[in-house]
Image: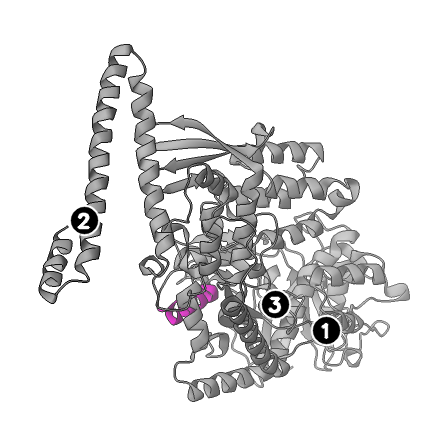
Amino acid sequence: MENEVIEFDIGLGGGGNIGRPGDDDAFDIEHPLDDDDMPDSPLPSTANSGIFNASAYGNGGGGEIYLPEGDLLDLEPYEGMEFASEEAAKAFYNSYARRVGFSTRVSSSRRSRRDGAIIQRQFVCAKEGFRNLNEKRTKDREIKRPRTITRVGCKASLSVKMQDSGKWVVSGFVREHNHELVPPDHVHCLRSHRQISGPAKTLIDTLQAAGMGPRRIMSALIKEYGGISKVGFTEVDCRNYMRNNRQKSLEGDIQLLLDYLRQMNADNPNFFYAVQCDEDQCMSNVFWADPRAMMNYTFFGDTVTFDTTYRSNRYRLPFAPFTGVNHHGQPVLFGCAFLINESETSFIWLFNSWLMAMSGRLPVSFTTDHDSVIRYAITQVFPQTRHRFCKWHIFKKCQEKLSHGFLRHPTFEADFHKCVNLTESIGEFESYWLLMVDRFELREYEWLETIYLDRKQWVPVYLRDTFFAEMSITQRSDSMNSYFDGYVNASTNLNQFFKLYEKALESRNEIEVKADYDTMNTSPVLKTPSPMEKQASEFYTRKLFTRFQDELVGTLTLMASKANDDGGTITYQVAKFGEDLKAYHVKFTVLEMKATCTCQMFEFSGLLCRHILAVFRVTNVLTLPSHYILKRWTRNAKSSIILEERTSDRYASYLESHTVRYNSLRHQAFKFVEESAKSLETYDIAMAALQAAAKKVVLAIKNECRIASVNGRVKGDSSTDGSRAKNTSGNH
């Protein structure tokens, strides 16, 4: 080559000058990349005797691994070795690296100043050089998850340069490495050798379309190819490929989604939607809520579920609705999200957008899947809201993560269910858990340890003090069922989604209307003569009354006995006959008509448990105190009527006030009798006081009867006397 050259170095470190002495018509360009930054470029698969033909590689679209055949199988690079193209040299060195046990990358290049064509290349071991922590890309930002150090200053390399003939010749080769090489069964983990072949891509596409996740797809590939090392890539590569597939398929549908939301907003200005864009101004995430969703939240926004089932590989849509539970125990929608970017920043943006649509009112509790990214976002946006991981999602993952344990121990699932759902206290759960782990030899399962560390966010005994609108601790509530179950499935695409979305809204609304109709136009069958049951049947919706009725009837099998009386609060022990070891304890404050139970059902679900109702029965509390009837469970949940101001049922009001007076007097009388009977002197004093009090009560009753008689007679007299009677009555 007869080029007059100017040579200069603009390298960022890691590689040396590979120019020939006397080459003064070229300049160096270095490309130091970490092993983790290596692109997944496909590799060629054909060689041609001593000179490797560039035409065999085309444009690198085959995706096959280059493996020399015959005498070239164990061929090692040497100076003077010729290749038909630069790509052939790169492929050969990468194939050599695969056989030896290391990963490669391109370190530096040299271009001709005359036409800019590359005339020299240096391929190095991926562990060549050292990472420069002062690189521009990390200078002005904080790195939350720093990468592991992969470079150790290895000198192994292959340098090639282009000849006047157009062929490429090896100008330098360093064989020795300063680190251990990777054994053959681990080579597929090295970045430059992790390639997804064409047939593998086809199989992944087919299985992904069928709704399979990356883990199950990798299991199928391993079985198909006869081992993970023969697959040629890892589960991470499979997951990334599937994610890229999903994003590409969504790109054409994004405009369709935006057009739909704009039209909905044009039809109804109260329709809310927000769009998050990335650094390239491309749509990243979308949230929307219609006026009905926002209105639902004003009535039932005390507890919220963020359902991320749809963004799993069970479905093709990265879709996540915000849902709650209405006064019939049915799922109700609070808004929807369409997720493309699932970073912490994106979830923070999403939750803030949702909160803005809901007028900034925070929920009491929030339920999500077991996800650390979502948990971090919730701590930032809802710091005062009680966050819970969905127990049923964890149970489902348990069957997958502990499959070997399930197979070895057939009784493990039943014991796991009993430990989580049926333990009554934190201490009981802790001891049962440790016993279970030791019994089934599960200490080596890292995932089990992870969910144990997060136990305060999913195990019921830690959550019963917070309202989640669930009627049962052990069974899955309707509110946890996905709002769109039965409408969206694995084959649903975005074109179909809008019709199915609107169909789901219409169907759910019709189900609620039907439940309202049944509540207003039918009467339930009462099972007891209790005024409390009749009262509840008039307040609660039909489904909630049925649940309350079960608790009320359940009191007939319980015995409530006084365990302690500290003056203001009485503690009762409530249990079935002969089952004192399974007793619950209810604290009842007579003057305030307030009770708490160790089962904490009211705190968790908003309905009184049978244990408190049993105490009400033995203390003659004949109707439910108003503070135990949550409006969100009543037939007037979506009206402006305030439950405490309802006075139409005067009989129930009388019973409640009479019960308060009765219990207060009886409580004081018991204390009076107990103290007065301790000696003869106190007995005489108490008896005299009782006789005097009895005379005053009799006199007061006579006065009330006289006044009532006078008022009744005056009503029929002249207008003048009537006016006088009204004044008298008013003063009384």
Q: How many marks?
A: 3
Q: Amino acid at mark 2?
A: Ile
Identify which residue is drawn at 52% across, 52% down. 548
Who is closer to the viewer here, 67 or 606? Answer: 606
Say whether disc 1 or disc 2 marks the residue closer to the N-terminus: 1
Q: Position of residue 493 (x, y in %)?
A: 64, 79
Which residue does the numbered mark 3 point to in the structure image?
310
Q: Is residue 527 left or right of residue 631?
A: right
Q: Position of residue 316 (x, y in %)?
A: 65, 72
Q: Amino acid at mark 1?
A: Ala
Residue span colored magenta = 345-359
Q: Is residue 505 magenta?
A: no
Q: Nearer the viewer, mark 1 or mark 2?
A: 2
**Above or below, 295 relative to 606:** below
Q: What element does badge 2 sit on?
A: helix
Labels 2 & 3 near each other (Cβ < 8 A) = no
Tell me if I can see residue 144 in this picture: no
Identify which residue is drawn at 54% across, 51% down. 549
Who is closer to the viewer here, 369 or 391? Answer: 391
Q: Give the color scheme: rainbow, by chain, secondary structure or one colour.
A: one colour
Q: Amino acid at mark 3?
A: Tyr
- Whole-Å distance between the Cαs marked 1 and 2? 85 Å
- Whole-Å distance between the Cαs marked 3 and 1? 14 Å
- The numbered disc on residue 707 is 2
Say whether disc 3 or disc 1 marks the residue closer to the N-terminus: 1
**Above or below, 277 relative to 719:** below
Q: Residues within 10 Å of mark 1 (few under 14, many from 20)?
A: some
Q: Nearer the viewer, mark 2 or mark 3?
A: 2
Q: Residues within 10 Å of mark 3 (few under 14, many from 20)?
A: many
- The numbered disc on residue 209 is 1
Who is closer to the viewer here, 472 or 490? Answer: 472
